[in-house]
Amino acid sequence: MPATAYVSTTIPYVNARPHLGHAFEYVQADSISRHLTMTGREVYFLTGSDENSLKNVLAAEKAGMTTQALVDRNVSYFEELLASLGVGTTAFIRTSIDPHHLAGAAEIWRRLDANDDIYAKDYAGLYCVGCEQFYEPSDLVDGKCPEHLVEPELVSERNYFFRLSRYGDQLAEAIESGQLRVHPQTRLNETLGFIRSGLADISISRSASRARGWGIPVPGDPSQVMYVWIDALTNYINTFNWLHDDPGYHRYWADAERRIHVLGKGVLRFHAVYWPAMLLAAKLPLPTDVMVHGYITNAGQKLSKSLGNAIDPEELVATFGQDAVRYYLLAEFSPFGDGDFAEERLVARYNNDLANGVGNLVSRLTSMVERYRGGVVPARGGAGDLEADLESRTADAVRDSVAAMERFDHREALARIGELVRRSNAYVGDRAPWHLAKAADTGDEDAARTLDAVLYCGIDAVRRIAILLRPFIPAGTGRLLGAVGEDPAASLDSLTELAGRKVVKAGPIFPRIEL
């Protein structure tokens, strides 16, 4: 039975349409999921929608709709984006209606309560509705929320609190031992610094009146609803019916080789401190990896619906295509740092790397196989030092790109694949098969055997490049594999003899884009 892995995105608020930042996280997590599948793991890939927030309530009031009607409508926008990006999730969880989530969130509350980790007290604090979070004055920038650049409101009410302060030592030990890995190192250091500074207990409920009656009721106290973040974090295991010993829970969470959360840096504390502490208190397994990405910015500012600078990813896909958008996001942007969006860079990346690079390589080779060998890949023939060098570089690219993805570095993985594409194109130029074909036509048997080797090794490099690219641009690589007569579901370990395969003279698999 293959090893298993679990991958999740954060679940976004659905008070408005998705922006490019959501698309970035979706394709990052999808590339990780597909990479794990490609390397032999069986993967459960979860995303969903965070529906029990005050943001959603206020957006519904502004639109003159019920909150349920608003979230039902807006969820469809996120599902449509996932489809347009080719993101292959296992499940999509909705926190306002999923029965396993509603039951699981209440059960985790009860477990924390039974462990004497919950208590009630009066509280006053500075609250940002955009973040759905209380802030200390020291956390603010010029008196404003650092994420949304608005002044938080002063809220005073009686809430339930979680004894987070109990779990500092255990959290630090889990991170320092590698039981819970935070990527990159800078975010690990930030997390440990926050823990070592001393953890304060956190508010985990809101008054039902301030929440307008929207949210999951606190077990035993209907005057309070669960704080949306506490409710939302439990979705990661509530996708399984874990209360009733769901085999999927054991296979993909409790017994999984890796349990990976993909998230933005703005919610690091929730995922690397609050959520693991809740799991420790509930005596449930921790995630193994917290992968923290930066923000896509627009003129240096974080993309945000509230800031009014959001970029519509659906429009980008409609204009430039799925391959171009996915490739740009994964090849251009650091997996861990911020990066500024530029439409010109999207077009340049796609044209240079895919249209001119991969597309040109497969077009040249399939055309020559058709012209010189009737569209059938010949036997390997008289391979020499250049063929051995190409095969060695291919093995290096496989090793290095796979290793980069094990570190969640999609940009580095694509850089190594790009080097192989350039080397393969250079190899074809160096071997000049058109000259070999002319010599073979005059009866030069050595030239004919060398031509066979060039066509065989070139097509073999193309199919391996295509498989390496699959986690990043699955649609385009399906077309690539079809052009060289390979099974679209082929893996690097399942490749069979290439000689005798029928290839198709490839048209523009990656047509150039003009701005």
Image (cartoon, rainbow, N blue to C red):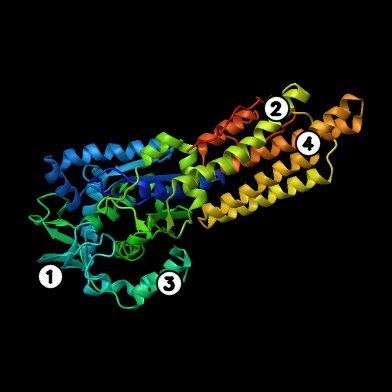
> Where does label 3 land, which residue?
189
Which residue of the protein is positioned furthest toward the bottom in this rendering?
Answer: 197
Kindly identify the amino acid type of the residue bearing the numbered disc 2. Answer: Ser
Left or right, residue 112 beside residue 470? left
* Distance of label 3 from label 4 (alpha carbons): 50 Å
Q: State which mark lies toward you, 4 or 2.
A: 2
Task: Answer with mark 2 or mark 1, whichever residue precedes in sequence.
Answer: 1
Query: Tag 4's secondary structure?
Result: helix
Residue ID at (39%, 71%): 190
Q: State which mark lies toward you, 4 or 1.
A: 4
Left or right, residue 446 beside residue 262? right
Which residue of the protein is positioned furthest toward the front in this rendering?
Answer: 515
Counting from the top left corner in percent of width and height, residue 217 is at 14, 53
Up-down: is 74 above or below 414?
above
Kindly identify the amino acid type of the residue bearing the numbered disc 3. Answer: Asn
> Where does label 4 land, which residue?
454
Number of other residues with Cα within 10 Å of mark 2, as a class: few under 14, some 14 to 19, many 20 or more? some
Left or right, residue 59 beside residue 246? left
Q: Are dots 3 and 1 in contact, CB under 8 Å?
A: no
